[in-house]
Amino acid sequence: MAGLFSTRITSPARNLFFSNTFTKQITTRRINTAIKMGSQPQADITLYTNHACPFAHRAHITLAELGLPVREEIIDLNTPRSPEYLQINPRGLVPTIIYNGEIITESAIVAQFLADAHPSHLLPASTDKNGPLTRARVAFFADAYSNKVQAHIGKAIYRAQTEEEVNQAVDDAVAGIVKEVEPLLKNAAPFFNGSDKLTFAEVLVAPFVIRLLSSAKHGLLPTNLPSRLEKETPNFYKWAQAISKNPSVLKIYDEDRVVEASKRVRAKFASKA
């Protein structure tokens, strides 16, 4: 995962007018007003996104769980990025957020920033009693899914050229779930680590899990995959079903649109084979 790209949105004129002293006075005034009102200052957030992108989906889930208002700017991933967007994010990827004037990119970093800036059930602070351990468990879980499961699912959907290659990639993914992921979900209730609400583990992984289920439903993966998971990985299957029904996960998820986008990506890989 690439690092954080954070830049302050300013102009020369604004730099001249907003000295450090004046900025501190404004910030203090806003904080004092918020204290009197009994709430935190409301963040000003713009999200640059594409609803078919699983990485951008992480930001949407986080924002939904935190109940944060946000302005959306949809980025067309099928056309060259505009010069204006490349000034904001030189990589041209989504998601990007502008949070109170700060640019933050890369999906996991965006999601963790939001979770840390707005403490909630998603992720304990590192200063909490069990915070560091819980955060480590979540990071390990996400890493295990990414490297031992999603890497093979991506190969099966997009890069496998024959039925044999598809089946082998799916077998490898299931083996990764059995060995690496299934044991970590033994106390899911229904979500990670015994939680009855989404956690940061789901934020990072849910976009890929729901796409796995959709891909099997629409024939991009073997249609018997869900029944196989139910039999061979019952913890994972129950957890995946809970994810697939969660309102925050489903809020911007358009299954037909996602499947069509996956088919286009697969066709591009096939044309280059």
Image (cartoon, rainbow, N blue to C red):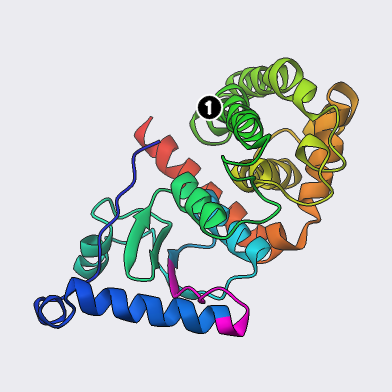
Q: Which residues are magenta?
A: 36-47
Quadrant of the frame with the C terminus: top left
Quadrant in which residue 28 is drawn: bottom left
State whether residue 36 is above or below residue 207: below
Residue placed most toward the observer, 244 or 26: 26
State whether residue 92 is above or below residue 191: below
Residue 110 % position (x, y): 46, 53
Quadrant of the frame with the N terminus: top left
State whether residue 202 is above or below residue 20: above
Three-letter residue code for mark 1: Ala
Residue visible at 48% across and 52% down in the picture: 113
Q: Which residue is mark 1?
A: 160
Residue 26 % position (x, y): 33, 81
Is 99 in the magenta? no
Q: Is residue 9 rendered to the left or right of residue 129?
A: left
Is 38 in the magenta? yes
Q: Is residue 10 rendered to the left or right of residue 233?
A: left
Residue visible at 27% across and 66% down in the picture: 85
Quadrant in which residue 38 is drawn: bottom right
